[in-house]
Image: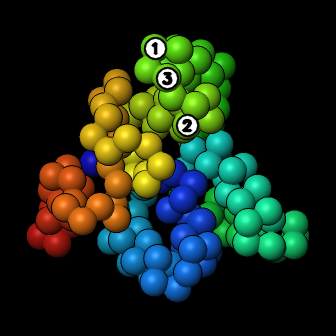
Amino acid sequence: MKVALDTNILAYIEGVNGASRKASAAEMVARLPAGSTYVPVQVLGELFRVLVRKANYKPASARAAVGNFVDIFPLIETSPPVLAAAADLSVDHGLDIWDAIILAAAASAGCRLLLSEDMQQGFTWHGVTVVNPFSTKPHELLEELLEELLEE
């Protein structure tokens, strides 16, 4: 099962919002399937901005952090079809265009889950379901994925 990560997951891994959130985000991502966990390029741009503006990283340090994620995860490009789908998603469902780009990119890559704390839990579009991995009751698709990985 392919999974895409939203900005907040990577920001937490970088320590934004405290050590406990960093540990839980890092642990959860470490359990995801290697090679099947993707990051939309839009997420990396947002991450750079969050690290510089919110976490007070120097731009060079933010660039290095983004580069580390580029080395770890396969990327999903923001192509013209992704942008067109995101515009439709924004118009039809009221999503912010930047969130819509991330969701449309995840769909274009064939992802089944988009892990995000910022979007509506359970919202499904073109086969991608938004799941908050920090929810007190884990979504059944995320539970299913993590259980499959334990069995391997």
Q: Amino acid at mark 1?
A: Asp
* Mark-to-mark CA distance, 2 and 1: 13 Å
Q: How is the image coloured?
A: rainbow
Q: Which is more toward the observer, 8 or 143?
A: 8
Q: Quadrant of residue 59?
A: bottom right
Which residue lies most toward the bottom here? 19
Residue denoted by label 3: 94
Nearer the camera: disc 3 or disc 2: 3
Q: Residue at x 32, y 35 (%)?
A: 123
**Are the residues at dot 3 and dot 1 in contact (C-beta closer than 8 Å)?**
yes
Q: Which label is found at residue 99?
A: 2
What SS does tag 3 mark? Answer: loop
Q: Earlier in the sequence, mark 2 or mark 1?
A: 1
Q: Residues within 10 Å of mark 1 (few under 14, many from 20)?
A: few
Residue 115: image x %, image y %? 40, 52
Per the rendering, the mark at residue 92 is 1
Residue type, label 3: Gly
Q: Residue at x 29, y 61 (%)?
A: 135
Helix, strand or loop at mark 1: helix
